């Protein structure tokens, strides 16, 4: 039986008639494809589901309400980058008071208590109702487990694997015990007396981001590590480290498993990584893990080589990895694929065959109290630098257009302004063009609105406008303050 869903009211009427099972055979849905019929599995829909659901991607996509919780972690930010610009998604973020970066990254952000705090489920469900959320993506390992444990109490779907998988993978010791006979795992010392040779490695059994992980050189350091909570003591693995990003369909098994090298890490986060060739051995490891753990959607596992170069399992996690952006850039959008898997839509994974490297660094995002409706922009040495367009400034100008702000080009350009704009394909940006030919005139004389800003490379022009008009002024190095990267 196939079902085309045409809106919430119709869906509710159908649901009132009883549980509907859907035949999804012959449906091939590419991760970012268009033009395919979409048959929504009714039994997988939870939450408001207020967006129109129509039968063709080429006409209209169901806009699923997605909440990333917590949204400001590295995991949450990768989910944000994966989903924010897609027609299928209405994105929002939530987190506790400790999630300081979230409000800088999401336009729709709500603060809720930490998981485990009194009333956290009620508060989360209130956000789900307010923002018309259909599914929640966990952005932290502890939250992942909490959401899995309380899945039936959450008023939206939870995009993750079954509870048993989430519980086992939260413990490295339990993971090793389950998988030790199907993939190579490190030797774990159950008691300190088993250690015959130092150094060894100690870390908490339940942790993330290398928190509490220490190299232990002798018995004194071992005692200190155990006292600090690093209760999993294992052989030292001195070799290279790899992350294997995976995607599984609960019926079809592992559809993608490819390793990437972790070339530089900070606080357990891969800051530099590169693709590795497709490996039969890696794929075998992924399938072996999936024989013991029921894995739905996106997941990953990490390996590190021992002294003989044998890769041994470090951890398995049933979620999107923070640096899986490397494979997303090749065409494997794990977050979107995980949504489709959650909804039981068949997918095809078809990445580009390109070798790439990814290097990450800190990013600046700002909050400010500046209100402005009119943007005055200089042309020479500001919008045009030499013989190139300032692409970052153009991005800001389109952001201003999206916000309904008025754009005015104000310039002393020595040549024909229209010809220059046409040459660089900048003609249609402007609400007004002010071409100043009087060498003694100041740009401030042409700015009439008190809620204006001026972007100009000239310090003198900026100083006069700021002092005479009391407006904010910027050169190209300052405009990152104005960029609103919330999604």
Image (cartoon, rainbow, N blue to C red):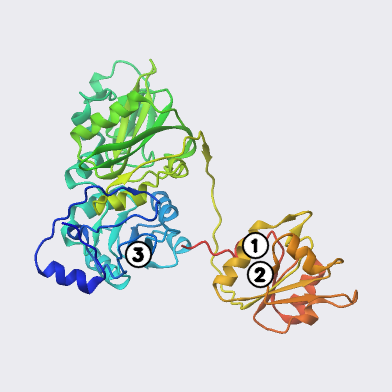
Q: Extreme right residue here? A: 439
Query: What distance separates the C-alpha of mark 3 from that of mark 1?
Result: 28 Å
Describe residue 405's horizontal placement relative to residue 411 as left or right: left
Q: Quick check: 389 left or right of 131?
A: right
Q: Secondary structure at mark 2?
A: helix
Q: Are marks 2 and 3 in contact (CB under 8 Å)?
A: no
Q: Earlier in the sequence, mark 2 or mark 3?
A: 3
Q: Which residue is mark 3?
A: 63
How far is mark 2 from mark 3, CA to CA?
30 Å
Q: Is residue 118 visible?
A: no
Query: Which residue corresponds to mark 2?
Result: 429
Given residues 357 and 191, the one toward you in this image is: 357
Of circles 3 and 1, which is in front? 3
What residue is shown at x 51% (from left), y 33% (from top)?
355
Query: Which circle's residue, 2 or 1, is located before the other in the chain?
Result: 1
Image x and y of residue 261, in percent: 45, 31
- The residue to which callout 1 is attached is 394
Question: Which residue is outermost to the left?
Answer: 18
Q: Nearer the viewer, residue 267 or 160?
A: 160
Q: Quadrant of the rendered structure where residue 383 is?
A: bottom right
Badge 3 or badge 1: first in the primary sequence: 3
Tell me if label 2 and label 1 are in contact, CB under 8 Å: yes
């Amino acid at each position: 039986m196939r079902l085309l869903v045409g809106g919430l009211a119709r869906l509710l009427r159908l649901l009132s008639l009883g549980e509907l099972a859907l035949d999804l055979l012959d449906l091939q849905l590419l991760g970012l494809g268009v033009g395919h019929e979409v048959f929504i599995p009714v039994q997988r829909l939870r939450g408001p589901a207020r967006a129109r659901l129509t039968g063709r991607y080429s006409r209209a996509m169901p806009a699923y309400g997605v909440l990333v919780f917590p949204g400001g972690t590295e995991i949450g930010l990768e989910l944000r980058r994966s989903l924010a610009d897609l027609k299928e998604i209405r994105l929002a973020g939530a987190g506790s008071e400790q999630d300081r970066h979230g409000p800088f990254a999401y336009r729709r952000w709500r603060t809720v208590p930490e998981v485990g705090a009194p009333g956290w489920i009620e508060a989360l469900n209130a956000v789900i109702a307010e923002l018309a959320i259909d599914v929640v993506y966990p952005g932290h390992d502890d939250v992942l487990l909490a959401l899995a444990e309380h899945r039936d109490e959450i008023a939206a779907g939870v995009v993750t694997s079954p509870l048993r998988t989430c519980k086992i993978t939260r413990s490295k010791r339990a993971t090793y015990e389950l998988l030790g006979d199907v993939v190579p795992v490190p030797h774990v010392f159950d008691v300190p007396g088993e250690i015959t040779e130092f150094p060894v490695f100690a870390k908490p059994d339940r942790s993330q981001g290398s928190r509490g992980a220490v190299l232990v050189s002798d018995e004194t350091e071992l005692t200190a590590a155990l006292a600090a909570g690093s209760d999993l003591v294992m052989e030292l693995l001195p070799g290279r480290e790899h992350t294997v990003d995976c995607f599984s369909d609960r019926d079809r098994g592992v559809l993608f498993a490819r390793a990437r090298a972790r070339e530089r890490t900070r606080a357990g986060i891969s800051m530099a990584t590169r693709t590795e060739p497709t490996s039969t051995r890696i794929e075998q490891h992924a399938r072996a893990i999936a024989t013991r753990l029921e894995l739905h959607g996106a997941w990953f596992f990490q390996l590190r080589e021992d002294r003989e170069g044998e890769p041994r399992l470090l951890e398995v996690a049933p979620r999107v990895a923070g640096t899986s952006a490397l494979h997303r850039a090749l065409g494997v959008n794990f977050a979107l694929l995980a949504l489709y898997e959650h909804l039981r839509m068949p997918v095809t994974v078809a990445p580009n065959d390109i070798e790439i490297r990814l290097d990450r660094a800190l990013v600046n995002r700002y909050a400010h109290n500046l209100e402005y409706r009119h943007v005055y922009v200089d042309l020479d040495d500001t919008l045009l630098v030499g013989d190139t367009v300032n692409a970052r400034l153009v991005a800001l100008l389109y952001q201003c257009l999206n916000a309904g702000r008025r754009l005015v080009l104000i310039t002393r350009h020595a040549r024909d302004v229209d010809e220059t704009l046409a040459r660089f394909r900048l003609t249609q940006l402007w609400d007004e063009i002010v071409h100043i030919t009087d060498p003694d005139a100041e740009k401030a004389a042409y700015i009439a609105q008190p809620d204006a800003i001026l972007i100009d490379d000239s310090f003198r022009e900026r100083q006069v406008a700021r002092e005479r008009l009391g407006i904010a002024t910027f050169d190209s190095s300052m405009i990152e303050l104005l960029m609103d990267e919330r999604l």
